[in-house]
Image: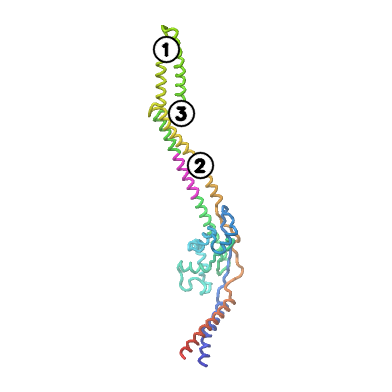
Amino acid sequence: MTQRFKTINALSVITVILPTILAVLYYGLFAQDIYISESRIIVRNPAQSAPSPLNVALGQTGFGAVSEGNNSVVAYLQSRQAIDQGNEDGLITDAYSDDGIFWFDRFGAFGADSNEQFYSYFSDMLTVDEGATTQVLTITVRAFDPGQAQTINRRLVAQSEELVNSLSGRAQADQISIAEGEVEEAAEAARLAALELARFRDTSGIVDPVQQSEVGLQMISKLQDELIGAQTRLRQLQTYTPQASQIPFLQTQVRELQGQISRARSELTGGRESLSSALAQYQEFEVNVQFAEAQLAATRAALQEAKAEARRKQAYLEQISTPSLPDYAVEPRRIRSIIATFLLGLLAWGVFYMLAIGVREHRD
């Protein structure tokens, strides 16, 4: 019985009394006050439509898509780059490694001095939560000084805003750059089509085959009228005055008019060098020019639309509440922590005591 009492006393001292005394000493005398600065932000995109009730429900169950901008900010704040940028002047490391902080709470007390170790340490001091339905980001910074907690929080918010502006500006620049590239390609195609048309005119000596064809047809029509008139007079003379001296002249005139008509028709439709062949090539070049100009006009309109759409889709960070300046220390929760230590000690005492009884009964 005495042995069992000694065992109970030893277990209670190790698992309950000693941890509780240490918790009372630490939380009552040494634990550093922790001040919490809180801010709320949201990344807005005017082009995004409001979420439907179904999307909200899906978002609550984990199947909905959250804001891409919010995801970027959360990933950035939880990265080493955010700490490095905010700690360029050493403000963050100084806030957690000051000699006035109790050695157990400050950074570097156990010989830790690397950036990786500080990143792990600061990750416990920074919390970024997103609301289930509102998608509002809550940034919580814990520090041992209220002013430093607010300053660090304010820096992280400013860096997040710079990140959102940078990503939005880059997306806008990429969208506009693609549209400008298409305009340049269309302008070059239009220039080449115009050059081909000009080169054809220079080599063929034909400015506009359509107009020249119309002129040629008018000339043929006029010659045909003259031919008909000459043939009519010739038949009249041959019928009524066969011995008239004008008959040979009219015969010669008819032959010349027929030759002129034949040559004019040959120029229009006589072969590769004819006007009809040149007209086919000219129309091909003209269609290319018109198509290139239409495409250029379309790409220019698309560029203007891309610029307007980029302005409409410009994302920005909005502060729902600015970083707060805490006026009292929220943590550590001293009484709660002491009670929790005592209860955990009792739980550990009960577990070890039952194990000890089981071992003793097994031996017996």
Q: Which residue is mark 2?
A: 298
Q: Is residue 218 magenta?
A: no
Q: Nearer the viewer, residue 306 or 121?
A: 306
Disc 3 packing (10 Å; few <14; some 14–19; many ≥20): some
- Find numbered disc 1 in the image and state the secondary structure of the residue it sits on: helix
In the displayed structure, would residue 83 be above or below residue 252? Answer: below
The image position of residue 178, as x and y in percent, is 47, 47
Q: Earlier in the sequence, mark 1 or mark 3?
A: 3
The image position of residue 329, as x and y in percent, is 59, 71
Q: Pick out the residue farthest to the front.
A: 239
Q: Earlier in the sequence, mark 3 or mark 2?
A: 3
Q: Residue at the location (42% across, 26% down)?
A: 268
Q: Residue at the location (46% across, 13% down)?
A: 232
Q: Which residue is mark 1?
A: 250
Could you tell me the amino acid type at mark 3?
Answer: Val
Could you tell me the amino acid type at mark 1?
Answer: Leu
Observer-side mark, 3 or 2, equals 3
Region rendered in magenta: 174-189
Could you tell me the amino acid type at mark 2?
Answer: Ala
On residue 210, the disc is 3
